[in-house]
Amino acid sequence: MAKSRTIFVCQQCGNQQTRWLGKCPDCGAWDSFVEQSVTKTPAGRAPQLLVTSKPTPITAISSEGFARLPVEGEEFTRVLGGGLVPGSLVLIGGDPGIGKTTLLSQLGARFATQQGPVLYISAEESAQQLKLRIERLGLLNDQLYVLNETNLDLAINAITELKPTLVIVDSVQTVYLEDITSAAGSVSQVREGALRLLRVAKETNTPIFLVGHVTKEGTIAGPRVLEHIVDVVLYLEGDRFHQYRMLRGVKNRFGSTDEVGVFEMTQDGMREVTNPSQVFLAERSAGTPGSTVAVTMEGTRPILVEIQALTSHTQNPQPRRTANGFDPNRLTMLIAVLSKRVGLPLFNQDIYVNVVGGMRITEPAADLAVATAIASSFRNQRVDPDLALVGEIGLSGELRSVGQLERRLGEAAKLGFRRALYPSPAGAPNAGSGFNLEGVRSLDQAIRQALVDKPEEARREIYG
């Protein structure tokens, strides 16, 4: 007969223990173990395996019927890698209230108009709530079906009967399977539910979107194996108090993970931002000390963002170093380079760095703009408002070349900038006529060329 025993499973990583532990030995999460009952079947004669498929030469495999499905909107299409692949399982996560349901409601309603019936499985909101949102967005459609169900077995039956062109499950942590005794959202439920939905997607060639909750650390809740099961993992990022949202690809089996889509949250839903650089620079504080413009790359798209820095004298023996939208560890390194290689006495300065618009910069090409903004604020000298900065800074204070330099500078010239500082070892790129390119080798040289007035003149102009 089958024997039942009790185990304890970590809800963050899936680690199993025979007794309860306060801290998971694998992922380090505290108070994450939950008691579960498992049934062990006694060993017997091995089952006979039935061969249902045979190895096939790759040249004999047909790719017909696997063309990408068009998705309305260039931003979503860019992040997905060119469209929606039939049979793909896409996981989208984000903070509560960031706009995941709104974005997928718009996607489902527009997809239903173009491709056919779409099934929205709502396990969190009622059907009436979802209809009110669709009405507010002005996207009511007879081809958009809503199923208010938390039982995943019944939801899969509805998928089989309706045969939709797209399925949206909101959310994967709130649906459950009856044959698993643990609660909804547990490791067993999330893992097995995702596997069954993956099987449905592959067998019917139906793309499925899963909405995932995130933890306080910003990662998708549940076991890490969930992200390994799905084909695509997307994160919707942004500050709830800002109107701009960034849809970023973290994993994509069918395309690049370097792309990012920019949206604006409005009363009419999520609206695409086709020219993010112009939006992020619309309210730029040009001519103010501590303000620079960095040229970053998000996948194949160059984006110009404003970097703001503020230095303030402090009596605290441990000055504050605060970064919003920039890596704090890299900020600490840049401050050390400014102190050692440029000679700025920043040991008694609180330093704050902000990337305007809620953008998050991860590439080192923004080093020069951040360091120049700090030097500008400390010396109270303005940076040329027509100047764009791009370059990585090494520990010796040298500037290192970055990729796709010509595309970066071309975008700056298109937006009306007339000067650019770039690492001279990269060679002279071509950015068009009327654009002055100045190659620099060191951070000290770049700061001298970027600042346009003397400290006393800037102080008189600002304060009178």
Image: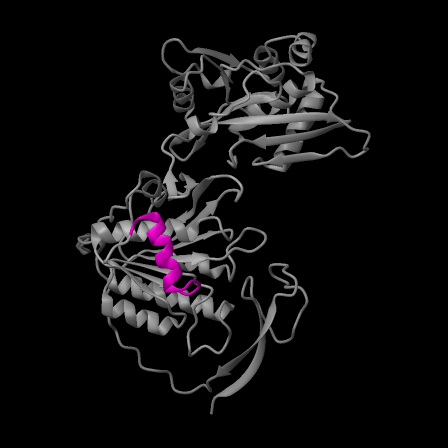
Question: Can residue 393 be seen in this snapshot?
Answer: no
Examine the rendered structure and indicate whether residue 348 appears above or below residue 433: below
Magenta residue check for 131: yes
Question: Can residue 308 be seen in this snapshot?
Answer: yes
Q: Which residues are magenta?
A: 122-139
Residue 337: horizontal and vertical position, in percent? 67, 25
| Left or right of 157 in this view: 360 | right
The residue sitting at the bottom extreme is 1
The residue drawn where x is 23% and y is 66% is 162
Residue 159: horizontal and vertical position, in percent? 28, 67
Residue 259: horizontal and vertical position, in percent? 40, 39
Question: Quadrant of residue 397 in the image?
Answer: top right
Marker count (numbered) = 0
Magenta residue check for 76: no
| Left or right of 240 in this view: 298 | left
Residue 340: horizontal and vertical position, in percent? 71, 22
The residue drawn where x is 43% and y is 71% is 176
The residue drawn where x is 35% and y is 65% is 197
Q: Overall secondary structure of the magenta stretch?
A: helix
78 or 53: nearer the viewer: 78
